[in-house]
Image: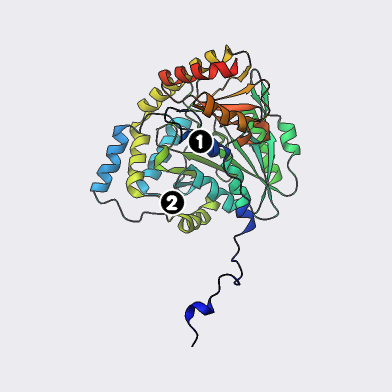
Amino acid sequence: MAPRESLLNPVSAPIAPIRPAIEALEDSRIVEVWKLGFQIPDVIGLWVGEGDLPTPAFICDAATDAMKRGETFYAQKRGISELRQALIDYHQRIYRIRLADDRVAVTSAGMNAMMLAMECLVGPGDNVVCVTPVWPNIFATVEIMGAEVRQFSLDPRPMGWQLDLDRLFAACDEHTRVIYLASPGNPTGWVMSRAQQVALLEFARKRGLWIVADEVYARIVYDGAPAAPSFLELAEPEDPLVVVNSFSKAWAMTGWRIGWMIMPARLTAVVDKLIEFNTSGAQPFLQHACAVALTQGEPFVAEMVARYRTGRELVLQRLGAMPRVRIVRPEAAFYVMFGVDGMTDSLAFAKRMVHEAHVGLAPGSAFGPGGEGHLRLCFAASLDRLSQAMDRLEPALS
């Protein structure tokens, strides 16, 4: 018998292919800039969507206590009953709505909720109309499923980003299955009005389209309301609506990777199966901590919103005094999306700011064509850190 190595010739063997659509997925331009900062010790990173404070102790202690109790085994795929009930109570308290348990699913991050939604709703030959500028990861969830992304841009106006509903409706055709939007928006801070929510929901009902609403930043609003308007306040239980959310932003839990989704009951069995195939469910000890975040975390949420409001005002004042800067004031979330006169390539400009100013910003082009000509700055940081960043940026933006 010939030696084994002579039977396996890697040179002549055919190359096992990777699925072309997956190989073609674009890398994140935000991460592309972020990686540059790893080489610069004193860079002030305002490029990614998280604050600079750790998760509060009462939430961490709840996770530790749950681990000590032995909450380290498999859990129900849609989440432990304690967290599902806490989510039901939370929506009752914040939005004055009562959700049935079979409409609630806990997910392994808000991103996982978005992926699950697209796995349920779209496939090859379908398209998803996405309101942009928006966090670009949503595009990948559509493309992974073999569907087409159709980007529809908000209009930047001095008084805020504006959505033209008539043009949005015209962008939908017979292959459209989903309209995706984030309100409050990342990176824009745009908030969809109640009137536009009513009109969009009615359009979706008439056309048999799904709305996937990203409400991850719902609690970070600056007009005194407890939360931004939610589609859940308008929708009937069986409306074609999926709302995705996360513990990451309002409770300073970006690294915990726990989210949730609210859906019609007819999706529940499908989502239950897909959770099994994707992650088998979120860690139970983390879920116990999330329940505590919901039941005890309102003072912390209020504290964080106040902190972000102060940071927003500092950044708007400082940027507004720089002659090359055009600002669209954000209504919510913790980002400023600002234009720079003369900037034609936001990715190249953001990279230059890392090297020259030692400040990390996200390029507007990362969020779709409507974002080019802009940069995104995350102001969820201390005032000292934001002031220092403004001092460093001022020479380049004046």
From what the image shows, is residue 379 above or below residue 25? above
Picture coordinates of residue 130, whole percent (x, y): 65, 39
Q: Residue flagged by tag 1: what amino acid is it?
A: Leu
Picture coordinates of residue 220, whole percent (x, y): 48, 27
Q: Could you tell me how far apart the alpha carbons at marks 2 and 1 are, in whole angstroms?
A: 39 Å
Q: Residue flagged by tag 2: what amino acid is it?
A: Arg
Picture coordinates of residue 81, whole percent (x, y): 37, 48
Q: Decide if residue 380 is in sight here.
A: yes
From what the image shows, is residue 2 above or below residue 388? below
Q: Secondary structure at mark 1?
A: helix
Q: Quadrant of residue 161?
A: top right
From what the image shows, is residue 250 above or below residue 321? below
Sooner in the amino-acid sequence: mark 2 or mark 1: 1
Taking depth in this image into account, of 228 and 202 the one nearest to the observer is 228
Q: Secondary structure at mark 2?
A: loop
Residue located farthest toward the left when viewing the structure as drawn: 68
Picture coordinates of residue 178, whole percent (x, y): 65, 45
Mark 1 Cα shell of 10 Å, populated few (<14), some (14-19), many (≥20): some
The image shows a total of numbered marks equal to 2
Taking depth in this image into account, of 5 and 34 the one nearest to the observer is 5
Q: Which residue is mark 2?
A: 78
Q: Which residue is mark 1?
A: 36
User: Which color mode does the image show?
Assistant: rainbow
Mark 2 Cα shell of 10 Å, populated few (<14), some (14-19), many (≥20): many
Q: Is residue 96 left or right of residue 163?
A: left
Residue 380's disc is none
